[in-house]
Image (cartoon, helix red, strand yellow):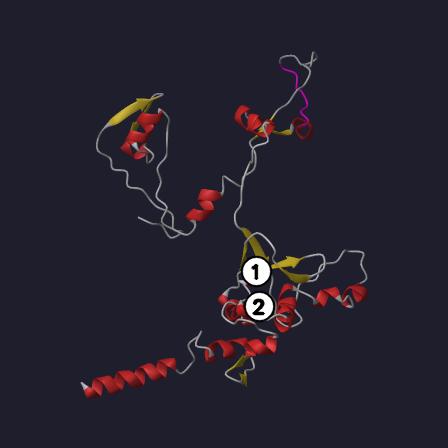
Amino acid sequence: MTDVNGYPIYRRRDIGHTIVVHGIELDNRWVVPHNVYLSTKYDVHINVKVCNNIRAVKYLFKYVYKGHDRVTVEISRQNDNATEGNVVDTDEIKKYLDYRYISASEAAWRIFKFDMHERFPIVERLHYHLPNQQMVLFRDDDDVQGVATRSAISRTMLTEWFKTNQESEVAQSLTFDQFPQQWVWNRKLKRWTLRKQGFAIGRMYYAHPTSGERYYLRMLLNCVKGATSLEHLWTVDGRVHDTFKDACIAMGLLANDNEWDQALEKADVWASGR
């Protein structure tokens, strides 16, 4: 069965067979899921689990990003004054030392300068924002007025995508998420340049449906090619809509409020004809 969080609950029947381990009587319900053939072939213990949820991706890859093996080690001199019955003060802060542990295989791998990991293709994280709601980074001691007047804060991935579409016909054949396949974002100059080598894919940050206009903006950026401005995204069949949501409805990406009424009318017509 699957619990409310999407994790599998394995069936462990009590078939009456028991075994005593360290003085404790155990039955079949204490046995973890395993494969007898694999355990016998490799002479090791191997857990076998079911992955039936999208959260399994997080579970499978968490070990890759957990970091290196670590060990806590303490080297100290024996206290000659510590005798039986005497209380010895313990400095817990000094006692805690965190060390990175490198196994023999990993050490050899690094000595020969083999690649430790590989990521392909490159994923470009695409920032998008509503009008005048772009992210601005500044230091604590920066002058707020000076930060607000910087010319660079108005140049974002999204605004430069609009500008590139205005200047290049090649760019107009791509949506915002397809753009990194042929264009490279220069973070220092804050502009898109035509890709000369390599390959990359673009992924826009997630927007929850309850986030309002930001969610509908993301939906339009996934569909509209060659947009030259936010107003361009609002325009559908020559009509400029007031919101991104209205533009999504006009493009057929969302159901409008009249869909249910139209469905009822069709049902009445079908019933009367029958």
Measuring 56% from the left and 37% from the top, which residue is drawn there? Answer: 67
Q: Pick the residue in front: 81 or 266.
A: 266
Q: Which residues are magenta?
A: 85-91
Q: Residues within 10 Å of mark 1 (few under 14, many from 20)?
A: some
Quadrant in the picture for residue 186: bottom right
Residue 215 lies, in percent from the top left, at: 52, 68
Measuring 34% from the left and 34% from the top, which residue is drawn there? Answer: 32
Q: Pick the residue in front: 73 or 16.
A: 73
Determine whether the residue tagged by mark 1 lies in a helix, strand or loop. Answer: loop
Q: Is residue 2 left or right of residue 100?
A: left
Q: Which residue is mark 2?
A: 170
- Which SS does the magenta portion mostly show? loop
Measuring 35% from the left and 37% from the top, which residue is drawn there? Answer: 48
Residue 81 lies, in percent from the top left, at: 70, 13
Determine whether the residue tagged by mark 2 lies in a helix, strand or loop. Answer: loop
Quarter holding the C terminus is bottom left
Residue 235 falls within the magenta-colored stretch: no
Residue 14 lies, in percent from the top left, at: 24, 35
Residue 89 falls within the magenta-colored stretch: yes
Q: Amino acid at mark 2?
A: Val
Q: Which residue is mark 1?
A: 182
* Residue furthest left as drawn: 274
Quadrant in the picture for residue 143: bottom right
Q: Is residue 169 above or below residue 12?
A: below
Residue 273, numbered label: none
Distance (Cα) linking label 1 and label 2: 9 Å
Labels 1 and 2 touching (C-beta < 8 A): yes
Q: Amino acid at mark 1?
A: Gln
